[in-house]
């Protein structure tokens, strides 16, 4: 097998990525995990096509709309395109490595990107990072092509940049990385005099305009949410959050790869021009997110785009120095993680340790709530929590009419943004909450009648009780 790898690395890498992708899709089909509430929300968005949504731009909803049209309104249907997108991302990353290094580096990049720990986790969940990383990889490839060859590659870059912005606003980090690349790589500064650079950026921003228009007509909802998410509450530094984020990056990229990446950055002056470009499109994002974590908080995946270029750089860095065995060791470790991510959920409850517990219990709880609604003719469903309303709208079948009341003047989620309380009229409302008292209902309904609670059962966490109320006489 080793001899075959040396002779036909790209062919074997392609076979591996294809096999892994089919395996991941099969594992999704066999999985009994419920949707995470973000996934349930994306499904809801997919049923209401738009140019934007409260917390995200629209591409994830469009993907889910197509995949559920093909595979049905099921967990499998919601997640179907995620492994496929990652296969394409691996191929695009390999193409970048082929430009910067050679076909051997391209092959290693493909299998390394396909098995990054964060990818193995994300391939089983519908998330905005999936199309974002695909677009980032495509933009990086077209950027290298335009730098080297000119021509119309700026069109591909512009399309990828715009699609990335419509996938997740983190694509804007490109505008941070580009100036760094121009500083670190004098050979690239000639692009400033080429019209393609500006035309590509302009094309990307043009494709993004529909989401800008949507925000302008919807209370600037997703722009405001993104700003709020930064959570800059004051000058107090949070070294604990910084350490937490930094440590999490070893789980995102993998310990061996991340350490080698840091090693490569320390000696950045010895890197070739193309390698410095790769560094420029990775480390600035990490630095920004480390700063964000220090002053507020940063989720582990917020620097995800950095690891496309970083992976290409690490692969080439090790191969050029004759350290392929470290790539092999990292690959073996990550392959174990990939298998665990695909099949671990099936045995986790029996082991008494279940990292997937947040994805259990919603289906049965939805059935219980469906019975309650069936016993209240004409009733609408409501909840005071985005996670609860998202899960129930997916798992209560047939889907009930619903409403979500604002707690203030400003909507706190997409359900509040698009909900019309006037539709309640004189109909009863079934209210599901984890709170002990329905405080936000004060003065809004004439009667608030407690009902027997429902439970969400998770094997290793025990039952989670949700209180239920019947609301009548809506008063505004």
Image (cartoon, rainbow, N blue to C red):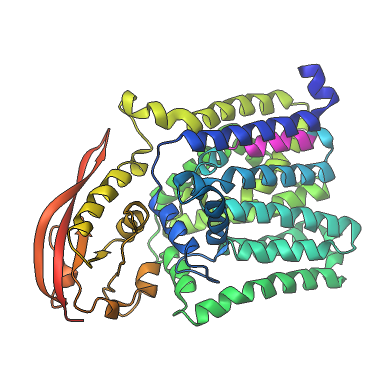
Is 388 left, or right, of 263 in this rendering? left
* Quadrant of the snapshot with the C terminus: bottom left
Front position in the image: 394 or 321? 394
Residue drawn 85% across the image and 59% down it: 147
Coordinates of residue 83 in the picture (x, y in percent): 59, 42
Is 106 left, or right, of 418 in this rendering? right
Residue drawn 69% across the image and 42% down it: 90
Up the image or down, 312 lies above or below 427; here it is above
Inspect the magenta stretch and tell me whether residue 271 lies in it: no
Dominant SS of magenta comes to helix
For the magenta stretch, what is the residue range? 105-116
Residue drawn 18% across the image and 62% down it: 376
How many numbered discs sit on the rendered protein?
0
- Residue 393: which quarter of the image? bottom left
Coordinates of residue 464 in the picture (x, y in percent): 21, 45
* Quadrant of the snapshot with the N terminus: top right
Let me know if residue 202 appears in the view: yes
- Residue 327: which quarter of the image? top right
Up the image or down, 77 lies above or below 347; here it is below
Let me know if residue 234 appears in the view: no
Coordinates of residue 389 in the picture (x, y in percent): 31, 60
Coordinates of residue 426 in the picture (x, y in percent): 19, 77
Is 348 left, or right, of 212 in this rendering? left
Front position in the image: 254 or 381? 381
């Amino acid at each position: 097998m080793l001899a075959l790898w040396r002779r036909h690395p790209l062919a074997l890498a392609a076979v591996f990525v294809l096999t892994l992708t089919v395996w991941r899709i099969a594992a999704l089909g066999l999985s009994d995990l419920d949707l995470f509430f973000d996934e349930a929300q994306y499904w809801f968005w997919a049923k209401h096509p738009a140019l934007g949504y409260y917390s995200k731009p629209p591409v994830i909803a469009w993907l889910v709309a197509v995949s559920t049209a093909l595979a049905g309104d099921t967990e499998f249907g919601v997640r179907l395109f995620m492994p496929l997108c990652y296969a394409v991302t691996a191929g695009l990353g390999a193409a970048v490595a082929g430009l910067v290094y050679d076909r051997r580096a391209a092959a290693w990049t493909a299998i390394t990107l396909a098995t990054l720990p964060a990818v193995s986790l994300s391939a089983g969940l519908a998330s905005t990072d999936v199309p974002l990383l695909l677009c980032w990889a495509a933009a990086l490839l077209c950027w290298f092509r335009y730098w080297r060859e000119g021509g119309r590659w700026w069109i591909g870059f512009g399309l990828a940049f715009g699609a990335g912005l419509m996938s997740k606003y983190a694509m804007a980090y490109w505008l941070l990385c580009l100036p760094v690349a121009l500083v670190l790589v004098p050979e690239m500064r000639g692009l400033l005099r080429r019209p393609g650079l500006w035309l590509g950026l302009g094309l990307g921003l043009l494709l993004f305009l529909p989401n800008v228009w949507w925000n302008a007509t919807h209370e600037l909802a997703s722009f405001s949410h993104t700003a709020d998410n930064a959570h800059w509450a004051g000058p107090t530094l949070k070294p604990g959050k910084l350490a937490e984020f930094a440590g999490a990056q070893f789980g995102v990229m993998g310990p061996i790869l991340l350490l080698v990446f840091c090693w490569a950055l320390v000696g950045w002056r010895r890197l070739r021009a193309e390698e410095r470009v790769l560094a420029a499109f990775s480390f600035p994002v990490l630095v920004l997110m480390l700063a964000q974590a220090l002053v507020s908080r940063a989720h582990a995946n917020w620097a995800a785009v950095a690891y496309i270029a970083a992976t290409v750089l690490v692969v080439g860095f090790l191969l050029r120095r004759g350290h392929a065995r470290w790539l092999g060791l990292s690959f073996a470790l990550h392959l174990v993680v990939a298998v665990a991510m695909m099949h671990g959920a099936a045995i986790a409850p029996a082991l008494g340790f279940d990292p997937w517990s947040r994805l259990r219990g919603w289906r049965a709880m939805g059935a219980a709530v469906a019975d309650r609604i069936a016993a209240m003719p004409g009733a609408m469903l409501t909840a005071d929590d985005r996670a609860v309303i998202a899960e129930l709208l997916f798992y209560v079948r047939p889907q009930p009419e619903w409403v979500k009341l604002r707690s203030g003047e400003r909507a706190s989620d997409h359900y509040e943004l698009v909900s019309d309380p006037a539709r309640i009229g004189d109909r009863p409302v079934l209210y599901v909450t984890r709170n002990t008292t329905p405080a936000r209902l004060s003065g809004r309904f004439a009667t608030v009648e407690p009902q027997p609670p429902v439970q969400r059962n998770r094997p290793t966490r025990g039952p989670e009780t949700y209180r239920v109320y019947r609301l009548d006489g809506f008063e505004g």
